[in-house]
Image: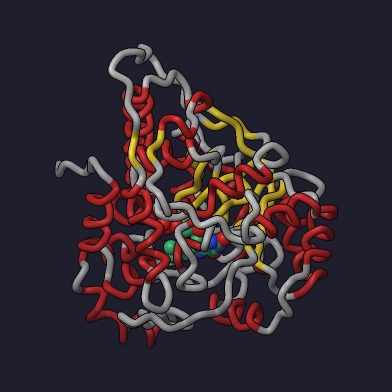
């Protein structure tokens, strides 16, 4: 049997690239405009250094923590993404992998599998909503998630419908009907193992979003839901406070990049934020999320849980983020590449790679636990941070 194990996230990405048809792989790369933000998300981590100890390592290191009331075995969660055509088992395979490795998962409202099926695979599930369709429609979606057993809500509001990419966007069909399937056959045939994976299911990728509809319904096609989202007036802070009140449980606002917004999120009653620029898929030119993290963690880290997502490719990146004030991080592309490379086992592999990297960084730093990490462990070069939403001349 072929050796399917990979030792780095970069190797998973390489396998995903070889395995997926070009449009599907490009859809995972995503990003917007010139790709300034997506590159900075990754490159910024390489600017940060470590301050290792020569003596002081403990025999075992503790990686466990909690996020929004859930115990997780490492400070890494699955960030919500829509993964329609990557793998037939989609989010259910991701959920099984996260459960097997002891962590929680955010499920996108644009996911390809119904929440009830995904939650059966991993009960540590946070449902993610976009501001789509107005209060009544959002309330119905959230109540379905509550009935299914979701243990937290993630609200993502950082999206500005930027559609151009200098390197070209993939052509994604509205629906995979017979005509489209035949038309796309030549592209699929360039990736026979991916084709075979889908062929075995006797069904082409389902480009619908079942969690946008009532339980048991197929849900609208992805692009119909997207169109409705474009036509929905964006939320206000009052809307966020309303939704938090309606949900009543653990509640994360994802996409915060500014200190003033983080403070308003606290006022709106959120329990957590993710410092995030949507993985560089939103407003290009936004700095890397890790550059915005320290000021936000300083300002609100003692009141709410501060997470980070964007650019995590190594365990050492996780350690850098935690040392600069994140309680945990969420990953996007890293697990999508694992899923593409080897299904559930590939996502487990990615989580194992990150766990191994966190553990060895802790050992090198002489820290017994992720909770012992601090600014002293990290070398932050002058000019690295970008405190956003802070009045000029103030500390935060
Ligand atoms: C293909 C793709 C789809 C995504 N879909 C969603 C989504 O449906 N909801 C959401 O909140 N974020 C979505 N995101 C953003 C991720 O949750 C996360 O913020 C981002 O991927 C983190 O950056 P990273 O990919 O560098 O880890 C998506 C990202 C990608 C790459």
Q: Does 169 sit above or below residue 395?
A: below
User: Horizontal and vertical percent for residue 231?
Assistant: 68, 84
Q: Is residue 217 left or right of residue 27?
A: right
**Residue positioned 31% across, 13% down in the render:** 55
User: Horizontal and vertical percent for residue 105?
Assistant: 54, 46
User: Horizontal and vertical percent for residue 320?
Assistant: 42, 39
Q: Quadrant of residue 70?
A: top right
Q: Is residue 228 left or right of residue 349?
A: right
- Judging depth in this view, the residue of 257 and 255 nearest the camera is 257
**Residue positioned 54% across, 46% down in the render:** 294
Quadrant location, the N terminus: top left
Question: Can residue 348 be seen at all in this image of the molecule?
Answer: no
**Residue positioned 42% across, 54% down in the render:** 383
The residue positioned farthest toward the left in the image shown: 2
- Judging depth in this view, the residue of 80 and 117 nearest the camera is 80
Q: Does 95 sit above or below residue 21?
A: above
**Residue positioned 50% across, 24% down in the render:** 372
The residue positioned farthest toward the front in the image shown: 393
Instruction: Identify the coloring.
Output: secondary structure
Q: Does 242 sit above or below residue 75?
A: below
Numbered marks: total: 0
User: Horizontal and vertical percent for residue 271?
Assistant: 72, 44
Question: Can residue 199 be seen at all in this image of the molecule?
Answer: yes
């Amino acid at each position: 049997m072929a050796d399917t194990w990979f030792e780095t996230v970069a190797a998973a990405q390489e396998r995903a690239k070889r395995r997926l048809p070009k449009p599907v792989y490009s859809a995972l790369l995503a990003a917007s405009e010139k790709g300034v933000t997506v590159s900075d998300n990754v490159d910024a981590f390489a600017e940060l250094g470590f301050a290792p100890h020569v003596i002081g390592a403990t025999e075992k290191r503790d990686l466990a923590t909690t996020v929004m009331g859930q115990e997780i075995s490492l400070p890494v969660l699955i960030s919500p993404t829509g993964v329609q055509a990557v793998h037939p088992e989609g989010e259910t395979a991701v959920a099984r992998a996260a459960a097997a490795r002891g962590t929680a998962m955010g499920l996108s409202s644009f996911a390809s599998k119904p929440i009830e099926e995904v939650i059966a695979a991993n009960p540590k599930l946070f449902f993610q909503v976009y501001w789509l369709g107005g209060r009544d429609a959002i309330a119905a979606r959230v109540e379905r998630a509550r009935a299914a057993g979701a243990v937290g809500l993630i609200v993502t509001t950082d999206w500005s419908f930027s559609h151009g990419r200098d390197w070209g966007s993939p052509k994604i069909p509205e629906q995979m009907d017979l005509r489209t399937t035949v038309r796309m056959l030549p592209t699929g045939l360039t990736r026979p193992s991916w084709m075979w994976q889908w062929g075995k299911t006797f069904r082409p990728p389902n480009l619908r979003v079942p969690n946008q509809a009532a339980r048991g319904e197929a849900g609208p096609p992805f692009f119909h839901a997207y169109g409705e989202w474009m036509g929905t007036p964006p939320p206000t802070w009052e809307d966020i406070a309303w939704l938090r009140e309606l949900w009543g449980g653990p509640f994360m606002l994802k996409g915060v990049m500014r200190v003033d917004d983080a403070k308003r999120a606290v006022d709106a009653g959120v329990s957590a934020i993710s410092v995030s620029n949507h993985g560089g898929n939103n407003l290009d030119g936004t700095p890397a999320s890790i550059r915005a993290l320290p000021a936000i963690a300083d300002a609100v880290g003692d009141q709410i849980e501060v997470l980070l997502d964007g650019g995590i490719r190594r365990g050492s990146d996780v350690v850098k983020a935690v040392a600069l004030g994140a309680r945990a991080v969420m990953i996007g592309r890293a697990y999508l590449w694992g899923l593409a490379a080897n299904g559930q086992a590939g996502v487990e592999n990615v989580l194992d790679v990150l766990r191994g990297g966190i553990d060895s960084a802790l050992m090198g730093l002489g820290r017994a636990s992720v909770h012992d990490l601090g600014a002293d462990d990290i070398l932050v070069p002058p000019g690295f941070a970008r405190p956003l939403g802070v009045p000029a001349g103030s500390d935060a």
